[in-house]
Amino acid sequence: MPATANLTTKQKVKITLSPIDHEGAVMELKDPTWTVESGDVEVEAIEPEGEDQPKGLTAYITASETIGESIVKVSAKGKLDDGEETTIEDLVIVNVRNLEAPALGLTVGAPEPIEEEETEGGEGEGEGGDLGEGAHPDQTLPGARKSGPTKSGKKKKK
């Protein structure tokens, strides 16, 4: 199953192979190779620290200035349980993105009450005084049903 690395254009990531067989035992690998299959990342295999460790099990993948996805294929020879040598392959999908903007340092203050504003016309001006936005002179809101006689002259039931 492919591994995924998310980098900015100014980062690199260390990838290490830790091969195990189907029983969970450590597998020996020979001749690991790292190949950039697509994209513009760079791969640099790291020399092992001890002489008894195989070469090429660890590598750095370094992002370039190109934004987008890159695919690195890793392959090595390993022995199956029956002793037969086979090539094992896996992928590293590297997503390179731009550096993000530095933090803005936002500070959120304590909530404050909203002060009511006076209307331009003042109170009592015009028919019905200051009724607020959308109110009718009879102090009902638009779309509100009025109680009173209907066309038939009978009062509506509530």
Image (cartoon, rainbow, N blue to C red):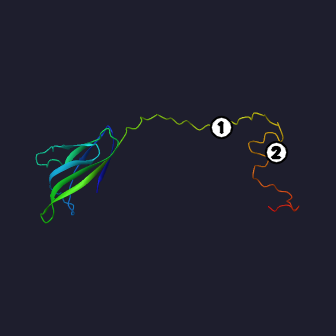
Specify the quadrant of the image occupied by residue 131.
top right
User: What residue appears at the point 29 percent right and 54 percent down from the top-left corner?
Assistant: 2
84, 41: nearer the viewer:
41
* Residue furthest left as drawn: 51
Q: Position of residue 92 (x, y in %)?
A: 28, 50
150, 158: nearer the viewer:
150
In the structure shown, which secondary structural element does the residue marked by tag 1 occupy? Answer: loop
* Residue furthest right as drawn: 153
From the image, state whether disc 1 or disc 2 is nearer to you: 2
Question: Up-down: is 20 above or below 99?
Answer: below
Number of on-image labels: 2
* Residue furthest bottom as drawn: 82
The amino acid marked with disc number 1 is Ile
Mark toward the start of the polypeptide (1 vs 2): 1
The amino acid marked with disc number 2 is Pro
Q: Position of residue 78 (x, y in %)?
A: 15, 58
Question: Up-down: is 41 above or below 155?
Answer: above
Tell me, yes or no, whether the two marked residues, 1 and 2, touch with CB atoms within 8 Å: no
Picture quarter with the N terminus: bottom left
The residue that mark 2 highlights is 137
Q: Residues within 10 Å of mark 1 (few under 14, many from 20)?
A: few
Picture quarter with the C terminus: bottom right
User: What residue appears at the point 12 percent right and 63 percent down from the top-left corner?
Assistant: 84
Q: Position of residue 129 (x, y in %)?
A: 81, 39
Find the distance from the CA under tag 1 to the CA under tag 2. Answer: 27 Å
Q: Position of residue 20 (x, y in %)?
A: 20, 58
- For residue 126, side relative to residue 102 (left or right): right
In the structure shown, which secondary structural element does the residue marked by tag 2 occupy? Answer: loop
The residue that mark 1 highlights is 114
Q: Residues within 10 Å of mark 2 (few under 14, many from 20)?
A: few
Question: Up-down: is 93 above or below 86?
Answer: above
Specify the quadrant of the image occupied by residue 27.
bottom left
